[in-house]
Amino acid sequence: MSLRTGAAARVCAGGLAGLVGLSACSKHAAPVEQRGPVLSLYVREGTPAARSIVTPAAVALALGGLPPEELRRLRKHMAESTDGALRRAAPGLFDLDAPPDAGAAVDPLQQSLPDLPALTAAANVVGTPWEAPGISVHLGAGCEPGATRCVPLFGTASGEGDSMLRRGRALTWALADAGLLRASAAGRAQLLHSLREAQLRSAGVAAMVFAASSGNIDPSELDPLRHEARRSLETLRPDAPQRPWLEALDQAPASWELPVALDPDELLVVPRLSALARLPDFVSEVEAAGTFEWAARPGGLLTDRR
Amino acid sequence: MAGSSGAGGSSSGISGSSSGGSSSGSGGTAKSLVGTWDLMTTPMESTGSITTTVVIGQDSLTVTSPDFSLTAVRTGNAVAYTDEQTPGSPGNNIVLTATQTVATFDTGILPFNLGGTWSMTVVQGGKNVGSCTLSVSSTEVDGACSQNPGGPFFSFTTKKMSPGTSVLGDFGGKWMNTFIDPGKSASYPCELDFIGSSITTCTRADGGVGGNPLSGITFTYDGANTASGAAQGWAEYSATRQ
């Protein structure tokens, strides 16, 4: 596990090299004892400027973190939803025998709700720098110069009694509370299959599963999704809440990339935002999926798999 | 399985000095939601990167987001809720003033005195636009609202079906809420479960169109500094105490 090249460029000189690099960091930031990605926490006065985190890169990452077959299901539901909206807008052009309110019953897009946690989580993963009133958090390969605090990204406890750490980890929840798994080649495929089955359950607590730190979405899946996004946009009112997501999907690149690198035997499982108060349930769901070793436990929780 | 040599498990890598303090931040305790919270939600619109700040005190509440602010302050037996829908434009504020006839009701970790009967008026732009009544007891919670003009807006009854233990005190147990929409001459039942540190309401089965407004809600408090869940069956949220 290491940080990807792009993010590493922001860290203090030589940070990857350990002690030599760490000595180049500000003396205000104490050394970090563990290798790997590090969160640099800053005290920031005032309220940060608003910016959209619903980006094409976030949508591409979400699609990369979903089971491949889910993309076809999403496309189907988007198409049905748009067709329904068009029917409601111009009923005379479509099935005249349909009851008056038939299209308004259950929007097929609602059936794609299991995909929303992935979109929410992906927006957080690529949301660097993470900011809230009074605090800003950066991800890097080492402790940044001038950082008020630094903490390893993975496996750190939630910071009871430590407000700044707790806030910093909460802002970066999708990665900071993710589970990092190490699986043998023999059991890896089955583990991945089980995790992806779990992530689509409405009562599930996992949002995204990654077996690699970058990848490409099959154009034969992505192009029809973009097409359906454009069709949906044509039927939506200007202030519709789903419009930013659809605009981002329309522009989503085929390639996606996590801001952290995974070793070949590692899997990354990202929790749902709604499950952050239930991290023990998240751990249980992941552990029920198969055989593996924890490289980093969500929230630093101790489990039977030590 | 044997463990990890990576980043797992230990907090030994935390650098810098701890701010110390109690196990719960911003003046709160694990037995109360009192404190200042960072609220994150499913991102929508252009301000998706900004957290909402929620300050919970004994009988007081402030919610501040880029798009609106809400404050609730108690004075004697009256609570005033001010919804500033457009920051900087107080003329658009909605003010709900609720007057309470107090009765015993344990709200557990929720630091609000809710028990008894309430009479409410809703004022927007200096005009009385509605009124509501509410009664809260350990066995039944009922309410009704009327619009002005317009007459009856909605009403609901909520009866406890079975008791249970909950961090929310007398809310503990399984309830049946029935939401009544007089405009459609329709009623929508919804079971509400307050068990342990969680709330779970009936599944939102209608695709989000109409129905019971309490459907599709989940809430879990971890007993320390995090609460999370979903609303309307899809919008996720998580709050962390500062």
Image: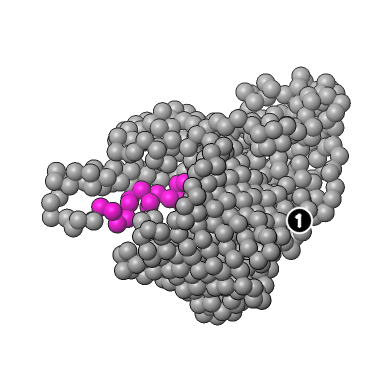
| Mark 1 burial class by Cα count in 10 Å: few <14, some 14-19, many 20+ | many
Which sits in the foreground, A290 or A18? A18
Residue at 57% over, 59% down:
B97
Residue B30, position as x, y percentages in the image: 75, 60
- First to last magenta residue range: A103-125
Q: Quadrant of residue B170?
A: bottom right
SS category of the residue bearing label 1: loop
Q: Reply yes or no: does residue B202 show up in magenta.
A: no
Q: Is residue B60 visible?
A: yes
Reply above or below: B224 against A240. below
Q: Is residue A270 visible?
A: no
**Which residue is labeled 1 in the image?**
B28
Residue at 66% over, 37% down:
A132
> What number of labels is visible?
1
Residue B142, position as x, y percentages in the image: 50, 73
Residue flagged by tag 1: what amino acid is it? Answer: Gly
Residue at 43% over, 35% down:
A244
Residue at 76% over, 41% down:
A164
Q: Is residue A267 shown left or right of residue A88?
A: right
Q: Quadrant of residue A289?
A: bottom right
Q: Is residue B228 shown left or right of residue B16?
A: left
Protein chain holding label 1: B
Residue A123, position as x, y percentages in the image: 54, 37
Q: Of helix, strand and loop, which mostly describes the magenta segment?
A: helix
Which sits in the foreground, A105 or B213? B213
